[in-house]
Image: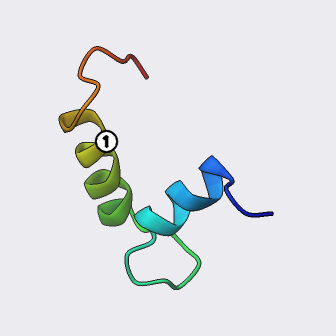
Amino acid sequence: GGGGGADSAFEQADANRDGHLDINEFRNFFGQQLGGAGGGSSY
């Protein structure tokens, strides 16, 4: 299904497109999410 938020987030986080997230990809992705817009959001 298209437009799935979790799927698109995973694809963005999976930098090398191998279908797996390593810890560096995970940290980079969530660092961007938390450091970018929506600073008031809690996770």
* Amino acid beneath label 1: Gln
On screen, residue 31 versus residue 42, left or right, reads left
On screen, residue 6 versus residue 37, left or right, reads right
**Quarter-wise, where is residue 34 in the image?**
top left
Q: Is residue 1 above or below residue 36?
A: below
| Residue 36 picture location, percent across and down | 20, 38
Q: Is residue 40 above or below residue 5?
A: above
Outermost residue toward the right in this view:
1
**Residue visible at 24% across and 33% down?**
37
Q: Is residue 13 above or below residue 6?
A: below
On screen, residue 17 versus residue 34, left or right, reads right
Number of numbered discs on residues: 1
Q: Judge the density around disc 1: few (<14), some (14-19), many (≥20) Cα neighbours within 10 Å.
A: some
Between 6 and 1, the one lying in front of the other is: 1
Quadrant in which the N terminus is drawn: bottom right
| Residue 43 picture location, percent across and down | 43, 23
Outermost residue toward the front in this view:
3
Between 23 and 19, the one lying in front of the other is: 19
Q: Which residue is mark 1?
A: 33
**Residue visible at 33% across and 54% down?**
29
Colour convention: rainbow
